[in-house]
Image (cartoon, rainbow, N blue to C red):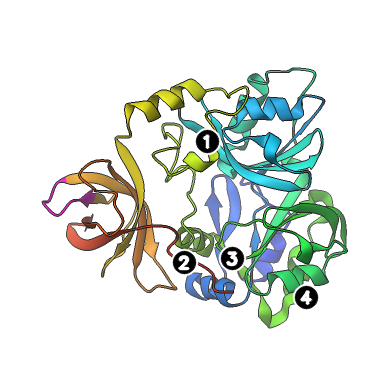
Amino acid sequence: MALKRTPFYDAHVALGGRMIDFGGWDMPVQYAGLIPEHTATREQAGLFDVSHMGEVRVTGAKALAAVNRLTTNDVNTIPVGSSQYSAIPNMTGGLVDDIFVYRLGEDELFLCVNASNTEKDFAWLAENNPFPGEAVFTNESAAWAQVAVQGRNAVGLVSSLTDASVSALGRGDIVAGSFAGVAGCLLARTGYTGEDGYEVFIPASEAAPLFQAVIDAGGEGIAPVGLGARDTLRLEARNVLYGNDIDDTTNPFEAGLGWITKLNKPGGFLGRDAMAEKKAAGLTRRLVGLTVEKRIPRPHCPILNMDGEVIGEVTSGTRSPILKTGIALGYVAARDGNARPGNALQIDVRGRMAAAKVVKGPFYTRDY
């Protein structure tokens, strides 16, 4: 089966992008290299093609009520023109996906879902719509391209390319406007890198020239960034990745996502009782952040306590280009203080033990 291509495929090739199969999409894993792309994003700005992500629009008199029943967070708290991070629960207390919910109007929501989950998510939402006819779910994924501009230079660069007042947006806010000469875009002050910046939804039919146009406008202050650095950036910021750190078996409380799980919101949500039961029974594991000495942790590496007992497994791991050390996320048994910040653990990296320490919060926090 032929790989799907975003509208920016030709631009990636022209910029020297090394293309790979990413979940059925022909996507750039890197251009100049993972480390220079990662560093450029932290020190200046990075441009990412995220057109493979999915978009679902929800409209109708009961659009908010429907999405509230189908997500863990409370959409009624989102002001028009803003957004929230949330999740789609399943009926057994796990997660169908983690998503962003944008409120475009009083009765209009725009959901951004993970690329590999687009069809699954849309089918789940449509099949479990509690108000058919009064809430309409439309899969608009094919109609949109998407780029992310992230880093210190992002605000100035995006401001110079749009007629919208993006510098005045608060974190999570979204506004309609043109971008790089393309009308009908949506510009959101959101992102996945730990930096300030924007994610811009662009009509796919008009998008092709835009990627290179942003590079040209940014000059030496921006670099194209591939999937490799996108992953190291998100891990430094301690953003979870669906399929690695969370999946359909994950209770959000064990993953540190209790803050987006409103068990007591009016009307509840599908899967609420199963999640509440798991929380009440006590967590058997917790997702922790780990700094790792000398070696590079990778998914599935065993995590051990200092007595040599296997107590968990790495779900995401890399060498931080900024911290110059190994960092990881992983689940450990929720007993004996295993998940306590400062606790010393070990990671088995291909048969060699590496010293690790539990850390709280992001590994990296921007300093501007």
Q: Mark 4 points at which residue?
A: 217
Q: Which residue is drawn at 23% across and 41% down?
A: 335
User: Is label 2 or label 1 in front?
Assistant: 1
Spatial CA distance of label 3 from label 2 is: 10 Å
Asked whether the beta carbons under mark 3 and mark 2 sit within 8 Å of each other, the answer is no
Q: Residue 186 carries which label?
A: none
* Helix, strand or loop status at disc 4: helix
Residue 293 vs 129, above or below: the answer is below
Q: Label 3 belongs to which residue?
A: 195
Front residue of 275/241: it is 275
Q: Mark 4 and mark 2 in contact (Cβ < 8 Å)?
A: no
Q: Which of marks 1 and 3 is in front?
A: 1
Q: What stretch is highlighted in magenta?
A: 303-309
Q: Residues within 10 Å of mark 3 (few under 14, many from 20)?
A: many
Judging by the rendered image, the residue that carries numbered circle 2 is 364
Amino acid type, residue under disc 4 in the picture: Ala
| First in sequence: mark 3 vs mark 2 | 3
